[in-house]
Amino acid sequence: MNSVLYRGCLSQCLMGFLAILSLAVLLGCRPGAATSGTKDAGPGKRPAATSTKEAPVKELPPAGKTEEASPEVPVKGLPGVDTPVQAMPDPQGAKKPAAKEAPAAKKIGSEAPAASEKPAPSAAAALEPSLDVAVKWLPKPAENPAAEAKNQAGMKPYSEKLDADVKLDLAPIHGGTFKMGSPAGEKDRNADEGPQVEVKVQPFWMGKYEITWSQYELWGMGLDKQRRGAKQVTPTSWDKAADALAIPTKPYSDMTSGMGKEGYPAICMTQFAAKMYCKWLSAKTGHYYRLPTEAEWEYACRAGTTGAYSFGDNPEKLGDYAWSTDNSNEKYHKVGKKKPNPWGLYDMHGNVAEWCVDQYSADRYKQLGGKLVENPLAIVTKAYPQVARGGAWTDEAPLLRSAARRASSKDWKAQDPQIPKSVWYHTDAQFVGFRVVRPLRVPSPEEAARYEITEYEKREFLDYRKAQAGKQ
């Protein structure tokens, strides 16, 4: 009986043991199956996940062994073999700044700087010759023996050849002293002409005539470069220097107002545009040109005389020397058709008023203090007013006197349709032009900076060029 019971219990135990063993085999050997208390899966095996949601802890393989890649199929939606690995978010939730690309190299003078990187005018000037003083990049002079002089005694009249059919004639003006302004008793005198000041002027050459359209548009319309291109002419070193300079935007109307072009004085340009033309002329010839100061202009106009006009005090003679409202027939005329002054300069009275390089101030002569002043100059620091001299075809005789001064104003751009207004044109100044001077002594860069594009004008030019980007 006991043996029978013993055998029965033994059979039951054996069956239970086999059942437990089978269950263990089924649960422990299936990859990825959950089990509690699973031992080390061994080298090359993933540890089995627990039946809870705890993250699996990955044990390092024994030294000298390399962990094999898991054969399981990747789960969709998680980083793995066939889904791109996404960048981990910043622990603080902040976005990391994207790496900045290096800025593209800029072509000199090709575009306006962006507002965030707009350089100071001095920095811009170092980048492009249009804004730098001409003496820093001026090429050596083209061969022209008559244009060379070591001192005042050696100065002679000469001509600069600008194109096959275009030349510029200049007359020597010896230095000296004179009384600038008009005496208190001069008829039709204006308050801004006094008190008279004794001024010393250094020698220079001055254009015999006002700059004409044929001379001006070689630069202003880019005709010099266009003609060379059409004729396939290889540019010289002077051409290359001139081509590097800025030129005006296209005019939006006929700046001659139908009054004539060939042989007539160029008009309607701003003082800034006239200064830029002088830079181009300097590059084209290798000689340093600029606008005259107000003192140089009056000194040359008077030509050693002390009367109201270079020919005396009698306005009845004005018709022999000038175009004014009395004889102009309401338009300007070809240059050089009237008598010159004693130093061989034409149209210093009338035809068109002429830009000087100075800022206008009504009490300028009071500022000079009544003592001998050498080479006075009022540097431009604002858009208006600036000085023009000589009177024009639109004016009556008193405004054509040697001492008469004219101040520019915003009205000279009244019909300019642009916003901002153009730095190149005075749409309503059909009466203003200019002539050029060349000092005997080439100035230093520091001296030249006073006569050329000022810091104010550089800022205005850069702002305007930025506003005009992509517009023509």
Image: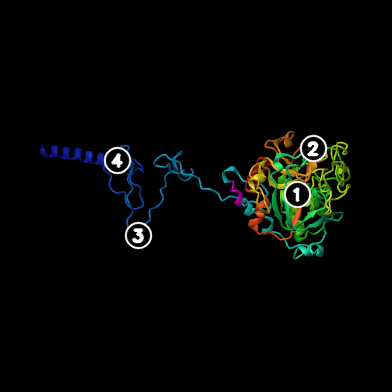
405 displayed left or right of 342? left
Circle 2 or circle 1, nearest the eye: 1
Kindly identify which numbered label has been placed on residue 35.
4
For label 3, the residue is 64
Q: Earlier in the sequence, mark 3 or mark 2?
A: 3
**How far separated are the C-alphas under marks 1 and 3?**
99 Å
x, y percent for residue 94: 43, 40
| Secondary element at tag 4 | loop
Circle 2 or circle 4, nearest the eye: 2
For label 2, the residue is 253
- Residue plotted at (28% across, 39% down): 23
Q: Which residues are magenta?
A: 118-122
Quadrant that contains the N terminus:
top left
Q: Identify which amino acid the numbered label 3 is placed on.
A: Gly
Q: Identify which amino acid the numbered label 4 is placed on.
A: Thr
| Secondary element at tag 3 | loop
| Secondary element at tag 2 | loop
Q: Earlier in the sequence, mark 2 or mark 1?
A: 2
Is 43 inside the magenta-drawn segment? no
Tell me which corner region of the image, top left, top right, bottom left or bottom right, holds residue 359. Answer: top right
x, y percent for residue 158: 82, 59
Res. 101 visible in picture: yes
**How far separated are the C-alphas under marks 1 and 4?**
109 Å
The answer to whether mark 1 and mark 3 are in CB contact below 8 A is: no
x, y percent for residue 374: 67, 55
Q: Earlier in the sequence, mark 2 or mark 4?
A: 4
For label 1, the residue is 298
**How far separated are the C-alphas under marks 4 and 3?**
29 Å
